[in-house]
């Protein structure tokens, strides 16, 4: 009889962030007390190395398909897809019988958990919260910009937001209706729906209208890959040291798994004309056969360590790399394209620790000017240092452990035999 407490994590593997954040929290649970089950579409060795999670393959959107849908302004899910998700999740919950399930961008999971009587927690950035105080939403890259232009879109976008949000929320509400459950609400309510909502953010960066006991701040959930060297291999580290010995400012560039990778050539062109050295992490999304002498590239790097040495981090504007940089006191230049990246960029810019340039408007000249501005801005560096000091007051792993141990959060299912590992 296994008396370990069973916790299930389910990631919608659209970007790397969904998996790494959940894996980071799952690693925080003591293996002597907990049996961790993890469900996602694939299990990259770089992320899951050293874990003993019970793994469960589960269908997920393909990242390329999700990116195409977002670029076209289309919904990621329809009712039929979500019903298939719910059926798979219910079977998994029945097999594992966890005390708690935790999801990241898995819009169906809270409904599945509700039907099965299992508490659910959703991990999502606070800038998506319906409780956040905000005056307006930024305009993400969208085909409508090509029809109306920047000025007209900026003018009319706020009026369209309520309709857009209802449109994107309607599939899960329709799925719930077919299952005899009430509608959740609009998109913000859908994204944050669960028994509990967990924010991987520093509350000092956002202004909330009020947070109930069901809404918890964990603090930033930071991750970097475990690699043989800082840049993934000792040979690459040797090459990096040769470049870095110039003594010039270091710029770390990564557009992650969801940034506008087509912008990388312009970023590199911008860097070629500057008195800096640069490390570019491609995440395997781009081949860079020809680089200027002041730029080196690697598939993956130990991002936190590189950011700590850098004078500036150039990213897609999202919270994963943005918070990683700010946690080391390094300012950020964001090049956002999708909605999430624009929202995260707003938070970082508002803290005074970053500047941004919309990816759709960027070219080598504008990127070069933005990098020069950022490198010469002492107040930007001071603000990043202030954010780093605030981040240091948070321990997301400890906060998550405390949450799981809190009375009333988990079901009492101890003492039952566990499911067989996949």
Image: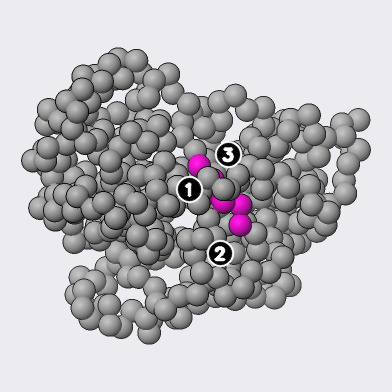
Q: Residue at x 38, y 84 (%)?
A: 159
Task: Give the camera-side residue of 354 and 31.
Answer: 354
Q: Say which mark, if any, is on residue 191.
A: 2
Compare marks 1 and 3 and give the one earlier in the sequence: 3
Residue 191 percent across, percent down from the top left: 56, 64
Q: Nearer the viewer, residue 184 or 355?
A: 355
384 sits left or right of 373 in the view:
right
Residue named by callout 1: 389
Residue 39 appears in view: no
Residue 221 is inside the magenta segment? yes
Tell me which label, 2 or 1, sits earlier in the chain: 2
Q: Nearer the viewer, mark 2 or mark 1?
A: 1
**SS of the residue under disc 1:** helix
Q: CA distance from mark 1 to mark 3?
A: 21 Å
Can you say whether 329 is above or below 129 in the image? above
Where is residue 218 drawn, in percent x and y?
A: 61, 52
Q: Residues within 10 Å of mark 1 (few under 14, many from 20)?
A: some
Question: In percent of the image, x 23 and y 53: which residue is there?
Answer: 377
User: Distance from label 2 to label 1 (Cα)?
Assistant: 30 Å
Q: Earlier in the sequence, mark 3 or mark 2?
A: 3
Q: Position of residue 200 (x, y in %)?
A: 55, 52
* Residue interval drawn in magenta: 217-222
Q: CA distance from mark 3 to mark 2?
A: 21 Å
Residue at horizontal 87%, vertical 46%? 413
Left or right of residue 152: residue 121:
right
Check whether the beta carbons of the residues at disc 3 and disc 2 lie within 8 A of each other: no
Residue picked out by circle 3: 24
Q: Is residue 50 above or below residue 408?
A: above
SS for callout 3? helix
Q: Is residue 381 left or right of residue 213?
A: left
């Amino acid at each position: 009889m296994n008396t370990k407490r069973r916790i299930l994590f389910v990631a919608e593997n659209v970007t790397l962030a969904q998996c790494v954040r959940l894996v980071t929290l799952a690693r925080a649970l003591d293996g002597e007390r907990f049996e961790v089950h993890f469900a996602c579409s694939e299990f990259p060795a770089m992320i899951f190395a050293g874990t003993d999670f019970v793994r469960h393959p589960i269908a997920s959107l393909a990242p390329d398909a999700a990116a195409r849908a977002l670029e076209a302004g289309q919904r990621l899910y329809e009712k039929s897809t979500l019903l298939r998700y719910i059926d798979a999740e219910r079977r998994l919950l029945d097999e594992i019988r966890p005390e708690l399930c935790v999801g990241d961008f898995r819009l169906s999971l809270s409904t599945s958990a509700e039907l099965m009587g299992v508490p659910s927690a959703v991990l999502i950035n606070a800038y998506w919260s319906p409780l956040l105080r905000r005056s307006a939403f930024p305009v993400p890259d969208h085909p409508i910009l090509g029809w109306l232009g920047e000025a007209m879109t900026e003018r009319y976008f706020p009026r369209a937001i309520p309709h857009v949000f209802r449109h994107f929320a309607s599939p899960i509400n329709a799925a719930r209706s077919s299952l005899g459950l009430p509608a959740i609400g609009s998109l913000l309510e859908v994204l944050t729906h669960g028994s509990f909502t967990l924010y991987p953010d520093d509350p000092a960066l956002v202004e909330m209208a009020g947070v109930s006991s069901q809404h918890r701040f964990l603090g930033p959930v930071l991750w970097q890959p475990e690699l043989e060297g800082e840049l993934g291999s000792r040979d690459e580290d040797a090459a990096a040291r040769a470049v870095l010995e110039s003594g010039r400012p270091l710029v770390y560039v990564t557009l992650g798994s969801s940034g506008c990778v087509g912008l990388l050539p312009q970023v590199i062109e911008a860097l070629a004309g500057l008195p800096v050295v640069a490390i570019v992490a491609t995440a395997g999304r781009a081949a860079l056969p020809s680089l200027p002498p002041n730029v080196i590239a690697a598939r993956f790097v130990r991002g936190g360590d590189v950011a700590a040495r850098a004078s500036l981090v150039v990213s897609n504007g999202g919270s994963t790399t943005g918070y990683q940089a700010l946690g080391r006191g390094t300012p950020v230049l964001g090049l956002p394209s999708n909605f999430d990246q624009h929202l995260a960029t707003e938070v970082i810019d508002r803290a005074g620790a970053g500047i941004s340039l919309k990816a759709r408007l960027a070219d080598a000249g504008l990127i070069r000017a933005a990098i020069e501005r950022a490198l010469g801005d002492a107040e930007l560096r001071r603000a990043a240092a202030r954010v780093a000091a605030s981040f240091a007051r948070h321990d997301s792993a400890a906060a998550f452990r405390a949450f799981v141990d809190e009375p009333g959060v988990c079901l009492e299912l101890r003492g039952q035999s566990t499911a067989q590992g996949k």
